[in-house]
Amino acid sequence: MVLYALRWQLLKISRGCGAWGRLLQRQSSRFVYSNIHGFDQVEIREKLQAFPGGSIDLLKQDSGIAVLTINNPSRMNAFSGSMMVDLEEKVTQLENWTDGKGLIVQGAAQTFCSGSDLNAVRAISNPQDGMKMCMFMQNSLTRLLRLPLISVALVEGRALGGGAELTTACDFRLMASDSVIQFVHKHMGLVPGWGGAARLVHIVRSQNALKLLGGALKVDPKLGLQIGLADGVLEAEDSAGTPLEQAENWLSRYIKGPAPVIRAVKKVVLSGRELPLSEALRTEKDVFGTVWGGPANLEALASKSKHK
Ligand SMILES: CCCC(=O)SCCNC(=O)CCNC(=O)[C@H](O)C(C)(C)COP(=O)(O)OP(=O)(O)OC[C@H]1O[C@@H](n2cnc3c(N)ncnc32)[C@H](O)[C@@H]1OP(=O)(O)O
């Protein structure tokens, strides 16, 4: 039995690394930008660290759900430079969390995130630094969305600017009844730069994305549900638990089961979302190979389970 388990672990590692490695290769890499794009990770990290404040907190739970909290309440959870670096580090930790199945991204103190810290923005308002910050955040948010975890943005209060972009780096969005997602970039003389426009088009289609960005529209839960930006609306707190409990409940129905199977689900959907069809099919075959004949599969076969 022990030998069998060991053999399966080794097989799983070799099959898993192969399939996931190939998926990442097919996506060029986890990173959108590297030094061939003039992106110097060390240099930009140092520059961002010069704008401190707030933190990004990560709690990995035994349930397989991690909670990532954007924590800078005195500035409505705006992203300081050091928080951008912190986010990148927390994404790396989540990439290495092999037991994980789900992720909830929330803001501290009942509001989501008001985008980049305007004090830092003012200090690095030259185009070169702006581009570097943009590449850094695109890399981190792309890696966040590509985690083999099913992720949910829990939106309370406001998600503005970069905060709205952050919600699109999750698989799902749950909105509290009085919450608002608003791409305010136009009012700032900007367009999204953290990858939010590209992801928004995938989520709500280009017509709706044009309306949201061109009109800097306030998306409340009703409009969010109508255009597919929101996947659910939270109930009043006293009847159904805290917003975080409600988000965990909502997510739990999609992550029930063994981690390798749930992670495989995310991987096949991710490849379908990101890759051309032939490549997505080949990746699906590779990921399928990581679960076929695995413990969960053998157990289900042995129990002759029915799906009534
Ligand atoms: C590619 C990325 C693009 C971007 O993200 S650009 C940034 C877009 N975000 C914004 O422009 C948000 C600007 N802030 C606002 O509109 C309002 O503060 C907001 C969020 C609606 C909240 O309004 P209120 O509830 O009335 O609260 P308030 O204005 O008194 O804010 C409380 C304290 O938070 C601060 N704050 C809010 N958003 C910030 C930000 N993004 N950067 C830096 N500081 C920010 C605000 O200045 C205030 O601080 P203080 O109490 O005056 O010291």
Image (cartoon, rainbow, N blue to C red):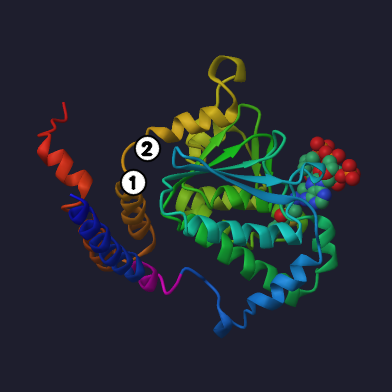
List x then y, in percent, for residue 293. Answer: 16, 52
- Residue underneath mark 2: 254
Is 241 displayed left or right of 14 in the figure?
A: right
Residue in the image at 34% along x and 36% along y: 256
Residue in the image at 19% along x and 56% along y: 3
Q: Is residue 65 visible?
A: yes
List x then y, in percent, for residue 42. Answer: 67, 76
Is 291 displayed left or right of 105 in the figure?
A: left
List x then y, in percent, for residue 115. Answer: 71, 52
**Tag 1: amino acid:** Ile
Is 29 displayed left or right of 296 in the figure?
A: right
Task: Tell me, for residue 38, which label it has, or none.
Answer: none
Category of crowding for the residue at label 1, using alpha-carbon neighbours closer than 10 angstroms: few (below 14), some (14–19), many (at least 20): some
Magenta part of the protein: which range? 23-29
In this rendering, the count of numbered labels is 2
Q: Is residue 197 visible?
A: no
Label 1 near ligand 1 (CB < 8 Å)? no
Specify which label sits upstream in the sequence, 2 or 1: 2
CA–CA distance in space, label 2 to label 1: 8 Å
Mark 2 vs 1: CB contact within 8 A: yes
Provide the secondary structure element on which disc 2 rests.
loop
Provide the secondary structure element on which disc 1 rests.
helix
Q: Is residue 157 or residue 210 the one in the foreground?
A: 157
Task: Tell me, for residue 262, which label it has, or none.
Answer: 1
Residue in the image at 16% along x and 30% along y: 307
Assign the C terminus to one quadrant of the image.
top left
Is 167 displayed left or right of 55 in the figure?
A: left
21 is higher (above) or lower (below) than 117: below
